[in-house]
Each structure stands twice: as structure tokens, then as C-alpha cells.
Amino acid sequence: MVVYRGQAYPFRNMLFTGVNRNHKPQVNNMAKVQKTTAKGKRSTRGLGRLFKKAGAKQYPADSTVKGNYYLTYAVNGKRITTTLKDSDGNPITTREAAESERKRILAPFAAGDEIEALQAVQSRITRAADGSGTTAG
């Protein structure tokens, strides 16, 4: 312990790093499913991030800027960003269509465990092979 100007510091490096004596530990409030902010409700955790892209700039999904919708989500620690496209292969430009496509893409990952997620992916593959389902790439 080091005493400097009447203050006791348990470690020497705290003496010179500017310790904040009024520091209070932050509480993790991210466990809530939805959080209300000044701008409105946030989306459910685990459903990725939906945004618009116009040129090289990214905008929030509810922005009035005209642009295509993109989805960013993480799988096993790897971040994946994809353009949302409809069944004809055209980029999606409406919020409702983007939300439905987001649910379709992330449905296998919303499953409880890995076995259910893999079964959901396998069922999508078999539907696509049979021609009864649509795929977007």
C-alpha cells in the first residue's frame, strides 16, 4: 500500500493513473428482452442489426434515406453482413419486407440449442432441394 497526500492506494500503478474515487460499478441492464429508449423500442436481443446503406454510408433502419436494407448478425463469434433480397433477387427497400426476411434468415439461430438449429437448417435445405421453398442469397 502506498500513501500519497493522505490517500492510501493499494497498488502503486493506481497512484499515477487517476483513480476515480466516486466510481460506482455499472449494472448490466442488457438482460432485458426489449429496452425503451428516447427514440423508441429496441429490437429483441439476438436478432442482429438491421440497417440501410446508401452509397458508402450506413443509416438506421427507420431512417427516411432511400437505400437497400442490410442485416448484420453473429454466428459462433463471427460477424456476418448480408444484403437482404426478395425471392426474385432484387434488394429489399421496405421495412416490413426487411423484417420478415430478417426473421426468415435468423429463425435457425433463434432455436434453443445447436441440435435444433442444425435441424432447422437441414429442413431448409431439403425444402430447397424439393423446390417447395424459396431461397435468397
Image: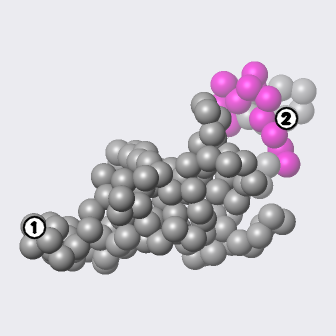
Q: What residue is rendered at 26% in x and 68% in y?
A: 134
Residue 118 falls left or right of residue 76: left
Q: Secondary structure at mark 1?
A: helix
Q: Nearer the viewer, residue 66 or 44?
A: 66
For residue 122, above or below residue 4? below
Magenta stretch encompasses residue 116 = no
Residue designated by label 1: 129
Q: Position of residue 107 (x, y in %)?
A: 35, 72
Quadrant, the N terminus: top right
Q: Which residue is mark 2?
A: 7
- Rendered residue at 45%/65% (across/down): 102
Q: Say what secondary structure mark 2 lies in.
A: strand
Magenta stretch: residue 11 in it?
A: yes
Task: Give the residues in magenta.
Answer: 10-22
Of residue 48 and residue 55, the one placed in the foreground of this image is 55
Question: In this view of the protein, can residue 97 be seen by the observer?
Answer: yes
